[in-house]
Image (cartoon, rainbow, N blue to C red):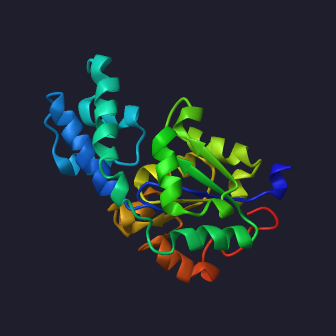
Amino acid sequence: MAADVAAALFDVDGTLVDTTYLHTLAWWQALAQYGHEVDAARVHRAIGMGSDQLLDHLLGDDRDRSEDDSVSAAHLALYAQHWPGLRAFPGAGDLLRECAGRGWRVVLSTSASGRELDVLRRVLDADDAVHATADADAVDAAKPAPDLVRSSLAQVSAAADRSVFVGDSVWDVRAANRAGTPCIGVETGGFAAAELRDAGALEVHPSVGRLLDGLDDSLLARPRTGGR
């Protein structure tokens, strides 16, 4: 039953794999290809949202949406050029294995899907620790909506308030909070610790490697055996 299961949910882009600034560049270039001049700093601050929400955020939700699919496809094509050089953050795979060993059901909770997700999983090289994966294809609304977090919990029949979400953006934190799941923030996506805490993160670490080093003192030390 859900009350007996706890999940450790992990965002992938910017949290486990060093991709945030590559996504920023790819979105900036894709938008420019379709005549949208958006400052790179604004693009960066939107990384972590689903593509529809990102375009709404950057271009306005009253825009002509007829080119949205083309812009998103251009982003993916530009981002794919960087796939051969992708790297997992130090300690990412070990953190997933350590969480699994401590009794958490590890779920990759990501807006990536298809070939992109396959690439990220190969880069992580930690499938032995991953119990399930939830991606944006399975939900109607991506982050910061709570749908992806809820889908991740459902994948392993886990209780929201006994589980933990780990992410790098304020959009991750807000999605987790809306789903009723405590969130740990990491600063590797470019959001400062104060911003992540202000969004609702209960603890913040410089990286997943540092989270691994301090795991015994974190929300991920052990799954809780009862209510909060």
> Could you tell me which residue is drawn at 31 percent across and 52 percent down?
82
For the question of whether residue 35 can be seen, the reply is yes
Is residue 220 among what the camera can see? no
| Depth order, front residue of 45/207 | 207
Q: Decide which of 63, 133 is in the foreground and name it.
A: 133
Question: Could you tell whether 94 is left or right of 38 in the image?
Answer: right
Q: Residue at the spot x=70%, y=67% of the render?
A: 100
**Count of marks, rendered view:** 0
Where, by quadrant of the figure, is residue 214 drawn?
bottom right
Picture coordinates of residue 34 (x, y %)?
18, 27
In the visual, does 98 lie left or right of 158? left
Residue 91 vertical placement versus 67 (above, below) = below
Q: Where residue 131 sits: x, y (%)?
A: 70, 55
On the image, which quarter does residue 78 sit in? top left
What x and y, as percent, mark residue 56?
32, 31
Q: Residue 18 is drawn in which quadrant?
A: bottom left
Residue situated in front as seen by the camera: 177 or 91: 91
| Residue nearest the observer in this picture, 195 or 99 | 99
